[in-house]
Amino acid sequence: MKKSIITAIFLPVAMICSVFGQINVLRIDNNSAPQTKDGIFYSLPRTVVKIDVKIDRIENYKGPYADFALRFLGLKNVVETNSIDYKISNISITTYAEPDSDQYYFVELGDKISKGEKAGMLSLNDAGVIIGTLPESMDTINKFVPVLKQVDAPADPDRDAFGELFKYSADVSVFEKVDTIIRKINIDTLTVERQYYKRTMVEKSPEQKAKEAADYISKIKENRFNLISGTQEVNYNKETLEYMDDQLNRMEKEYLKLFTGISVHKSVTFSYKYIPVPNQINAEIPIFKFLKSKGVIDLDDQGGKVVTIKIQRVGNTNTVANYLKKAEKDSKVQGFSYRIPELARVSVKLDENTQQETQCLVSQLGVVTNLPSGKWKVLYHMETGGIQG
C-alpha cells in the first residue's frame, strides 16, 4: 500500500509577543461572522481508525484420480469436490489524522508591530492542519517534514499457481489394442485358417490411468531409496545427489496431486475507515459482513456474519474536562486552540474466536482548550493536535 509524503507549508506571520497579546484565535462555524481583518485559517486534526482485513481465498480442485486415492494409495484426506472458501486470516487496526471539519480556526493578527519583534512562522501541513509556530530557523523547520517511505507490497507466492495445476494429468491417455482375427476358408475338402491382426487406438479408463500413476509413484519412491542408499554404487558428488533427489521428490508430489487434489491460497486485503464520534462510544458499529462461501459482502446483502467495531473511552481526560467546565472563560481574546487526546480501546469483532483489540489516542474524544493569547511559540503533534512543546 502506498503512503503519501506529508509536506509542511510554512507561512510567515508577523506577531508581537507582548503582555497585551497581539493575536486572537476565533473558532469558525456556519454561524460565525466573516472577518475583514488580516489573518490565517488552520484546523486541528481528528483521528481516523483504519481497519485492514486480510482475507484468504482458498480454491480447492479435485484431483482427476481422487476416487481411487484410497484404493491404490491408501489416502483418505483428499479434496473431494471443487470449491472456493474464504477465511479472515488477519485484522490490523491503525490510525491516521485528517482535518476535523468541526475544528477550524481563524488567527486574527494585530496591527502593531514593534521594531525589535522577531518574525515568527505559522506551520501548516498540506491539508491545513496546524503543526506549530516556529522561529525562522531552517534547523527547526527540517524536523517538521516527516517522510514516510513507500512500502512495496510483497510478491504473491501463488501468482503462478494456476499455470499447471495437474502437471502429469496430460500423460498418454490412449493405448494400442491388437485383436487377433481368425478366418477359416474351405476349399473343397480342405480347411485353411488365416490369422489377421486388427490394431486400434483405445482411450484408457480412469481406473487404468490411476493405476499407472500409482505405479509411477511407487517407482519414484523406489528410485529415491536406491539413490539415497547407494544401491547404484555410483560416487555422485553432493550437489548432483541433492539435485536428483530433489527432482524425484518434485515428480512424486506432482503425481500425488492427481489423487489428493490441490488447494491454492490467495490473499486480498480490504481497508475500511471509521471516524469515532462521542455519541457512538461503547456501541458496536457494523463495518461489513463476512460469508465463508463469498468472503466480504456488503451490509445490505443476505446472510453472513456482521463484523463490528467498538470504541471505549479510557477516561484519562475526564478530570481536565470537568475542570474546564467549572473554570471561568475570557471570551474576548483567545490564543491558539489545541487538543488533549483521549486514550481509547478499539476492538474489531466477528465472533468470540475472531477479534482484534488495541489502544490508541483519539483526538476528537478528548478535550479542546486554548493557550493564552500572548503565547504563540508552540509546537503541535500532527497526529493528535496536542501540544508538543
Image (tube, grey):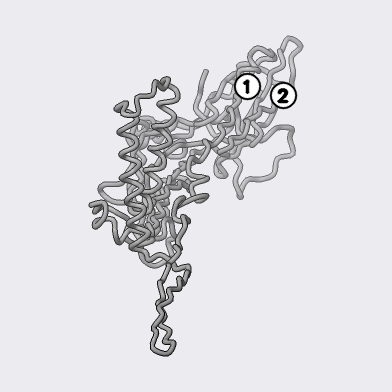
Total marks placed: 2
Reading the chain from its start, which is encountered first: label 2 or label 1?
A: 2
Image side of residue 291 versus residue 272, left or right? left
- Regarding residue 134, the answer to whether it shows in the image is yes
User: In the image, what residue type sits under mark 2?
Assistant: Val
Viewer-proximal residue among 65 and 206 = 206
Horizontal side of 160 relative to 246 (left or right) equals right
- From the viewer's perspective, tell me whether residue 337 is left or right of residue 40: left
Quarter where residue 41 is shown: top right
Q: Position of residue 262 (x, y in %)?
A: 39, 51
Residue occupying the far top of the picture: 116
Where residue 231 appears, x then y in whole percent? 31, 28
Q: Position of residue 381 (x, y in %)?
A: 52, 26
Residue indicated by mark 2: 13
Q: Residue at x 44, y 34 (%)?
A: 367
Q: Mark 1 Cα within 10 Å, few/some/many (few <14, many 20+)?
A: many
Disc 1: which residue: 133
Marks 2 and 1 in Cβ contact (< 8 Å): yes
**Dot 2, crowdedness within 10 Å: few (<14), some or many (≥20)?**
some
Amino acid marked by disc 1: Thr
- Quadrant of the image for the N terminus? top right
Question: Camera-side residue: 196 or 204?
Answer: 196
Task: Determine which of the numbered discs, if any, sits on residue 107 in the image.
Answer: none
For marks 2 and 1, give the CA distance. Answer: 9 Å
Give above or below for 289 relative to 51: below
Residue appearing at x 72%, y 26% in the figure: 11
Report the residue that reaches farthest toward the front: 189
Q: Considering depth in this image, is 25 or 80 the residue closer to the camera? A: 80
For image coordinates 69% across by 28% down, the residue present is 9
SS at mark 2? strand
